[in-house]
Image: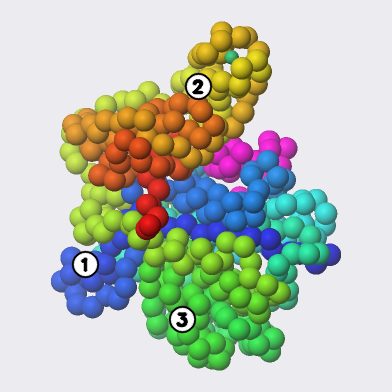
Amino acid sequence: MLVGLRAVGAAAPSLRLAAADVAAAWDRGGGRGRIALCAADEDTLTLAWAAADAALRAAGLDGSAVDGLWWGTTRPPFAEGPSIAVLGAALGIEPHARAALAAGSAHAGIDALLGAADAVAAGSARAALVVVSDALRPGPGTGFEARCGAGAAAVLLSAGEGAPATLGLHATRMQPWLDRYRGDGEADTRDVYDPRLFREEIFLPLVGEVTDALRTLEPRAWSLPDPDGRLGATVAKRAGAGAPASSAVYTALGDTGAAAALLGAVGALDAAGSVAIVGYGGGRVTGVLVHADVPVPGAASVGAAIDDAEARPVGYSGALRARGQLVPNGETVAMGVPPESAMFVRGAHEMLQMLGARCVDCGTISTPPSIHPHCIACGGPKLEAVQLAREGTVHTYVVNHTMPAPFEAPLPIAVIDLDDGARVMLQVADDGSNVEIGTRVRLVLRKYAHERGVPVYGFKAKPVRKVEE
Ligand SMILES: [Zn+2]
């Protein structure tokens, strides 16, 4: 069966660091472009959610329409734990959906794509969401540090008939070679062991075989791996690819690991024609051809997601703090988050899915449902669980300027009137400088806390950029 591609989405984290700042910190010159990195309340899971949310909105669907979730990332928030179950719940995907998490190398994004495509082709998933995301952490002082980025992409697959694009040929090669790696239990990604050996004996021959297979089909755009900032151009020349579509993503966000191959391609699906996607990592290279008959929904928004106008610049020390590589001495306040808390076990669903309790008699929505057994308007006892609206308006807010560690000040908190009439109190994403009474906001998934190795996720209100009148 032909596998169709219905919609795409992309996401980038909220911080940007100039590559030249990294070089300067180690008394080196040079450094081109910027790299993206996560703020303290973002990680590979919140990026995955944001890209998937964008793809679903582009398709005009919500998570309940999805019956398969494939996620590729080298850094799932739990090395062993409920990473994909948390992502599925936050996206509102049905609990009976098939789900698989691919990890282990930067090839994981391609593994997720091909796993989902096989499930659609076999008829075991009708609407399969593929999410690729990464937020890498480089070793301080390594060559990789000035290129190590973060980002995410998502594509929605289904049967090919009537789809705007279809998946075509794929070619793959596997060799037991050591390229970029991180040992078990290590936090930081290392450089390749010997750059020249890697270039001449491993990367160029292996990738060249795959691009040779794809170029016979004359794709109009390419997404190519670029592990050191120069090899991408060498591969593009051999493939006759001109300037690959992926080079703009590398310049804006850096190397996004398992997300790089798809993230470099989804923006190029904004026009009819074929796009060649080549993913590399862990001694494997795979090329996939996507043929678009018409522009794919969501592709035209990818550029704005990558060049996020609201992204905040940070210096080198700010980047080290955001990645947890520079930690202040002293006590932090224990927040008592899981695994012990019964509240988190019982409330996880209503918090991750933003559920409310709608009164069957008068329609009023009470939140959170677990502490409102009766309607807050009429007192009626007949309530049904509903997903809350994801947009609203700030009713009032406060900005906390002194917070004990591990919280970071300023911490804005707002009371939001959601568009379905429900009223919720949530933290505001970012520092609060862009919020006032009446500000329009959208709810986005963020990390609230991370204690004893357990991340806790929930929604925050993100101010929506004002449209110029
Ligand atoms: Zn009522």
Q: Is mark 2 within 8 Å of ligand 1?
A: no
Residue shown at 71%/74% (left/top)?
293
Direction front: furthest residue = 469
Q: Is residue 219 left or right of residue 184?
A: right
Q: Give the magenta range.
A: 81-102
Q: Is residue 259 left or right of residue 307?
A: right
Residues under numbered marks 1 and 2 in contact, where contact means CB atoms less than 8 Å apart? no
Give the quarter of the image for residue 273.
Answer: bottom right
In the rendered view, tell whether residue 173 sits above or below residue 54: below
Q: Which residue is mark 1?
A: 21
In the rendered view, tell whether residue 322 sits above or below residue 449: below
Asked if the stretch drawn in magenta spans residue 333, the answer is no
Q: Which residue is mark 2?
A: 368
Q: Which residue is mark 3?
A: 232
How far, Cα to Cα, is label 1 from label 2?
Answer: 45 Å
N-term-proximal mark, 1 vs 2: 1
N-term-proximal mark, 3 vs 1: 1
